[in-house]
Image (cartoon, rainbow, N blue to C red):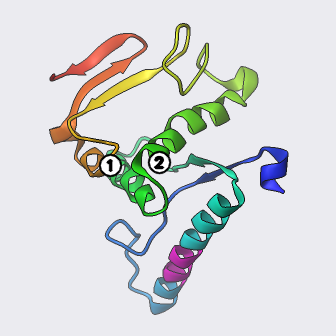
Amino acid sequence: MMKAEGAFWSIQPFLADEDANPRSDPIRQAKGEQVARGTVQAFEKGRGEGVKMAFGTDILMNPGGSARQGRQLAKLTRFMAPLEALRMATGAAGELLAMSGDRTPYPGALGVIAPGAHADVLVWDGNLAASLDVIGDPATNLRLIMKGGRNFKEAL
């Protein structure tokens, strides 16, 4: 039904790994493992049905959490090719955000690099078609940050 209606699934990789919320209580540990198994099923079923997916996150204004966000994005390659994961986090997310109509704070098209579009440009040191692991270490691998036509970091 989601595919038929053109609905988006905003999803993130909650997995049983180093980025999972630590739990000492056995009941909460079991629930976390259940969520991780459900996450794998959600990606597999959603992708198998052709549901449009956008990379979701609830990490906002949290420098510690934001540092994990690149690793979370790289984990999407467990379910799809690296460039497909980037498309999910950029173009698809921009398409979803644009659906907010007048509530969007950005003028112009989102998620694309085109005349009149509102696009941020990030240049990474690495072959993102082969692996997104470099995104997990932005201090080392992020070479250019351009937002709204202005450079905020330039280390090319």
**Residue sitting at x 53%, y 44%:** 88
Percent from the top left, x then y, of residue 62? Answer: 38, 46
- Please report contact status of discs 2 and 1: CB closer than 8 Å, yes or no: yes
**Disc 2 residue type (three-letter):** Ala
Q: Is the residue 156 above or below the residue 54 in the image? A: above
In this rendering, position of residue 70 left or right of residue 80:
left
Element at badge 2?
Answer: helix
In the rendered structure, the answer to whether residue 62 lies left or right of residue 138 reads right
Q: Main secondary structure of the magenta part?
A: helix
Label 2 neighbour load within 10 Å: few <14, some 14-19, many 20+: many
Q: Which mark is residue 132?
A: 1
32 in the magenta segment:
yes
Task: Kindly identify the residue that appears in the image at 84 percent across and 47 percent down.
Answer: 5
Q: Residues within 10 Å of mark 1 (few under 14, many from 20)?
A: many
Q: Nearer the viewer, residue 81 or 59?
A: 81
Determine whether, in the image, residue 11 is placed left or right of residue 98.
left
Q: Quadrant of the C terminus?
A: top left
Q: Please give the name of the residue rendered at 70% of the width and 25% of the height, measured from the top-left corner.
A: 103
Given the image, on which type of amino acid does mark 1 rest? Leu
Split into 4 quadrants, where in the image is the N terminus?
bottom right
Q: Position of residue 87 (x, y in %)?
A: 50, 39
Image quarter of residue 155 = top left
| Residue 146 drawn in magenta | no
Left-right relation of 8 to 127: right
**Distance of label 2 from label 1 (alpha carbons):** 9 Å
Which residue is labeled 2 in the image?
A: 85
Badge count: 2
- Residue at x 26%, y 41% (from the top left corner): 127
User: Would you place residue 46 above or below residue 87 in this image?
Assistant: below
Q: Which residues are magenta?
A: 31-38
Label 2 or label 1, whichever comes before in sequence order: 2
Q: Secondary structure beneath disc 1?
A: loop
